[in-house]
């Protein structure tokens, strides 16, 4: 997994409030199945429903998760 600096995270996250799966995969450098597995195990933020068939992740949750990785190292 690739860990990004704070500047890279800010650039990747931009100003959006909710990120869809393809964007999250690019930001965190994990596969779809790894994200799903880690989410179910409580090691990744939970997705939120944004429509009948659409889910995404809150920017604040992703920022907190990325910060926790940085603090762990």
Image: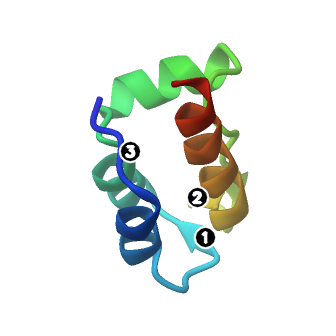
Q: Secondary structure at mark 1?
A: strand
Location of residue 28 with respect to 57 vertically, above or below: above
Count neighbours of disc 1 (C-alpha within 10 A) and say few if under 14, some if 14 to 19, many if 20 or more: some
Query: Disc 2 to disc 3, how far (Cα)?
Result: 14 Å
Q: Which mark is residue 18?
A: 1
What residue sits 60% from the left and 70% below the top?
18
What residue sits 61% from the left and 46% below the top?
67
Badge 2 vs badge 3, beta-carbon distance below 8 Å? no
Location of residue 50 with respect to 14 vertically, above or below: above
From the image, tell me which residue sits under label 3: 28
Count neighbours of disc 2 (C-alpha within 10 A) and say few if under 14, some if 14 to 19, many if 20 or more: some
Badge 2 vs badge 1, beta-carbon distance below 8 Å? yes
Left-right relation of 24 to 25: right
68 vs 38, nearest the viewer: 68
Q: Which mark is residue 56?
A: 2
Nearer the observer: mark 2 or 3; the answer is: 3
Query: Disc 3 to disc 1, how far (Cα)?
Result: 14 Å
Query: Disc 2 to disc 1, how far (Cα)?
Result: 6 Å
In primary-sequence order, the first of circles 2 and 3 is: 3
């Amino acid at each position: 997994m690739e860990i990004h600096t704070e500047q890279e995270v800010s650039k990747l996250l931009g100003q959006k409030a909710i990120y869809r799966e393809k964007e999250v995969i690019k930001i965190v450098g994990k596969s779809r199945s790894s994200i799903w597995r880690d989410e179910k195990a409580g090691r990744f933020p939970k997705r939120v429903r944004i429509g009948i068939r659409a889910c995404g992740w809150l920017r604040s949750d992703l920022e907190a998760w990325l910060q926790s990785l940085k603090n762990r190292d």
